[in-house]
């Protein structure tokens, strides 16, 4: 009698591993990760190695709590609101956009706090 090469429990384990996606469902493109970390490091000066890790941690926390598409929308709104004059006013004067900017600022503050980034440096 010939034994099967794969036992039922091993088959189950293989199926489970194949079903698990190694990349996070809300994974951000590398270029956006780099840009976020660079911006974070400019906003929070400190030792390069330490801040690279802390800012990467913050982005990982953001990526774990918001879909990339929503992140792009929220950051675009938040950055556009900081533009002076009429161009920024076109975004600032739209009350329906403020909740998204507020949510982004809250998520970012939570991520920075969780990654031990000094919020007072802003």
Image: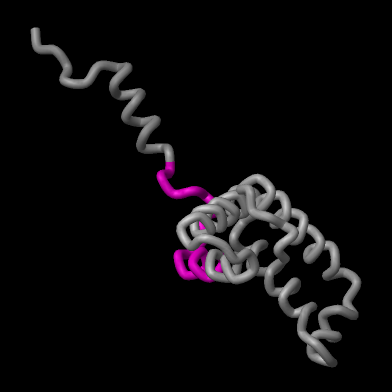
Please provide percent x and percent y for residue 72: 64, 68
Please provide percent x and percent y for residue 2: 9, 12
Please provide percent x and percent y for residue 14: 32, 29
Figure quadrant of residue 122: bottom right
Q: Is residue 119 above or below residue 19?
A: below
- Residue 92 lies left or right of residue 15; in this view the side is right
- Residue closest to the far left: 1
> Image point 53% across, 70% down: which residue?
35
**For residue 47: magenta?**
no
The one nearer the camera, 71 or 108, is 108
Q: In which quadrant is the N terminus drawn?
A: top left
Which region is colored magenta? 21-36
**For residue 25: magenta?**
yes
> Image point 84% across, 62% down: which residue?
99
> Image point 49% across, 48% down: which residue?
24
Q: Is residue 89 above or below residue 3?
A: below
């Amino acid at each position: 009698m010939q034994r099967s090469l794969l036992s039922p429990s091993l088959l189950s384990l293989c199926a489970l591993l194949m079903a698990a996606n190694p990349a996070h469902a809300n994974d951000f493109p590398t270029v956006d990760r780099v840009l976020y970390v660079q911006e974070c490091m400019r906003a929070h000066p400190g030792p390069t190695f330490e801040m690279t890790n802390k800012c990467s941690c913050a982005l990982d926390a953001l990526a774990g709590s918001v879909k990339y598409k929503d992140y792009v929308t929220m950051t675009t709104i938040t950055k556009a609101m900081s533009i002076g004059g009429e161009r920024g006013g076109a975004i600032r004067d739209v009350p329906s956009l403020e909740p998204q900017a507020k949510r982004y600022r809250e998520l970012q503050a939570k991520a920075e706090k969780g990654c031990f980034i000094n919020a007072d440096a802003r």
